[in-house]
Image: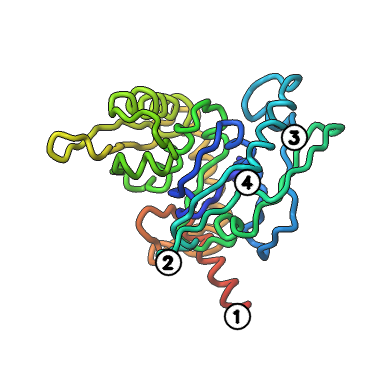
Amino acid sequence: MNEPQVYKSNALVEASYRLTPAEQRIMLGCITQVRRDQPLTDEIMYSVSVADYAALVGTDSHSTYKELADAALRLKRREVWLREYPNGQGKRPKTLVTSWVQSIAYVESEGRVELRFTRDMLPYLTQLTEQFTRYALEDVAKMTSAHAMRLYELLCQWRGAGERKVSIEWLREAFQLNDKYPAIKDLKRWVIEPAAAQINEHSPLWVKWDQRKEGRRVSHLVFYFGEKSLDESQKIGRKKNKAREASSAPGSIFRIPMTVIEANARPGESHEDVALRILEERKSAVED
């Protein structure tokens, strides 16, 4: 994987929070830097530079520092409501309300901001062995709708299923819409339709959606989604990559035989995700 990858616990993907697109990009850019193979610590500062941010979004970097600094300051004040432990360890007896970051540093001379995650947040970002979602940062970088970024994560969580049904009530709470868009027509016009349009335009997934009713009231939304078709050049590149992988390690990923990977696969997991989980489980067993 050459592109920076975002790893989040499914509990964090489904958490209740609200971030602007700029705040999301800073947060996701830092999450891609978290080492998944190292012990948890809240001492590390992760940084996002103006140049990296501008390249990610595809804008000019001259006026980006203020946007970056303002978004980082707002991010310090944001809350996230979590209802499950990471790694699928059962329901919480109580809801955890915490912050994303504990401190922000501005390095204006170098055109970057630094942040330190809160201790509560770290278990949802690193050393995840199951119940996590992964996608490329580039998939959402050019989205200008925070709702599109959130919806994309929810689809990636069920990437292998191709369908996800959510209640209107749950979606409103997860997106922290509060009293906004109380009418279903407004919710569809200002949240769902723009989000789906941006996913279709900017991400590797296509998505369509429908609604379900309980009696006369719309109670659920159903999203149907899948991978976009690859053009011929991408297909050729994919075949070459597979050929290289096959020549270096026939029938294996990370030197784990495909027979072992397929025997340990869980619903919705890619072969690479299974291989990563097996490696981490083996490491934990040695350390224990």
Amino acid at the residue labelled 3: Ser
Which mark sits nearer the N-terminus, 3 or 2?
3
Q: Position of residue 150 (x, y in %)?
A: 46, 38
| Residue at which label 2 appears | 93
Q: Nearer the viewer, residue 28 or 275?
A: 28
Q: Position of residue 166 (x, y in %)?
A: 30, 43
User: What is the distance, in whole Å, between disc 2 and disc 4 at their CAs?
Assistant: 30 Å
User: In the image, 97: left or right of 31?
Assistant: left
286 vs 103: above or below: below
Which mark is on residue 32? 4
The residue indicated by pointer 3 is 49
Tell me which numbered mark, 1 or 3, is placed earlier along the sequence: 3
Quarter assignment of residue 43: bottom right
Distance Cα–Cα, label 3 vs label 2: 39 Å
Residue drawn 25% across the image and 32% down it: 210
Q: Amino acid at mark 4?
A: Thr
Q: Quadrant of the C terminus?
A: bottom right
Label 1, label 2: how many angstroms apart (C-alpha)? Answer: 28 Å
* Sequence-first disc among 3 and 4: 4
Residue 237: where, in percent of width, then height? 52, 35
On the question of residue 46 being in view, the answer is no
Position of 83 relative to 143 (above/below): below
What residue does disc 1 label?
A: 288
Q: Answer yes or no: do the residues labelled 3 and 2 have beta carbons within 8 Å?
A: no
